[in-house]
Amino acid sequence: MLSRAKASLDPVTLTLGSDDALTYESNQLTAPPRVYVDLAQVDVEPSLHETPYAYDDGVVRSIRLGRHPDLTTRVVLDLDEGASFAVSTLQDPVRLIVEVAACAAGGAGGRNQRLYIS
């Protein structure tokens, strides 16, 4: 079960904690700019589900979690134009890390952005 979510400085780092190993797929879309991560066989703590978290300034505009078929949870990060991302996992405890950075030519640049969603 996905039970914790935390985000921190630019490059924005979103950390999703889980009680079990995570299997995921991720992709970036351009119109509108966003990243999504599909977490297979993951149930979400009800307090995190279907709640958008909006941010007024920075490379990440909002974060949403939603339910898809076959017990898949989708995490969507709505981005500033031109952002790049990377996804990785850590163990003990199990965490999925999504890092988003603004391009030098646009977006939030080197500004610090602290995001809270839990």
Image: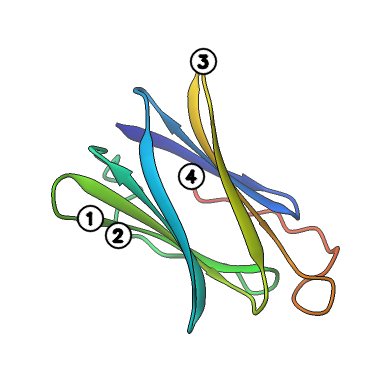
Q: CA distance from mark 4 to mark 2?
A: 13 Å
The amino acid type found where label 2 is placed reads: Glu
Q: Inspect the image, locate mark 3, and give the three-letter code of the amino acid beneath it.
A: Asp
Name the spot of residue 101 as percent of width and height, x first. Answer: 71, 60
Say which mark, if any, is on residue 87: none
Residue at the spot of label 4: 118
Q: Is residue 117 shown left or right of residue 106? A: left
- Give the x, y percent position of residue 17: 46, 32
| Residue type, label 4 | Ser
Residue flagged by tag 1: what amino acid is it?
Answer: Arg
Mark 4 residue element: loop
Residue that carries the numbered disc 3 in the rendered image? 92
Residue 50: numbered disc: 2
Q: Earlier in the sequence, mark 4 or mark 2?
A: 2
Q: Label 2: how many residues lie within 10 Å, few (<14), some (14-19) or many (20+)? A: some
Distance Cα–Cα, label 4 vs label 1: 18 Å
**CB within 8 Å, label 2 to label 1:** yes
Which mark sits nearer the N-terminus, 3 or 4? 3
The extreme bottom residue here reads 31
Element under disc 3: loop
Q: Residue at x 39, y 49 (%)?
A: 25
Q: Callout 1 environment at 10 Å: few (<14), some (14 to 19), or many (20+)?
A: some
Give the labeled residue for mark 1.
67
Q: Earlier in the sequence, mark 2 or mark 1?
A: 2
Distance Cα–Cα, label 3 vs label 1: 26 Å
Q: Position of residue 18 (x, y in %)?
A: 39, 29
Quadrant where the N terminus is found in the figure: top left
Which SS class for mark 1? Answer: strand
The mark closer to the camera, 2 or 1, is 1
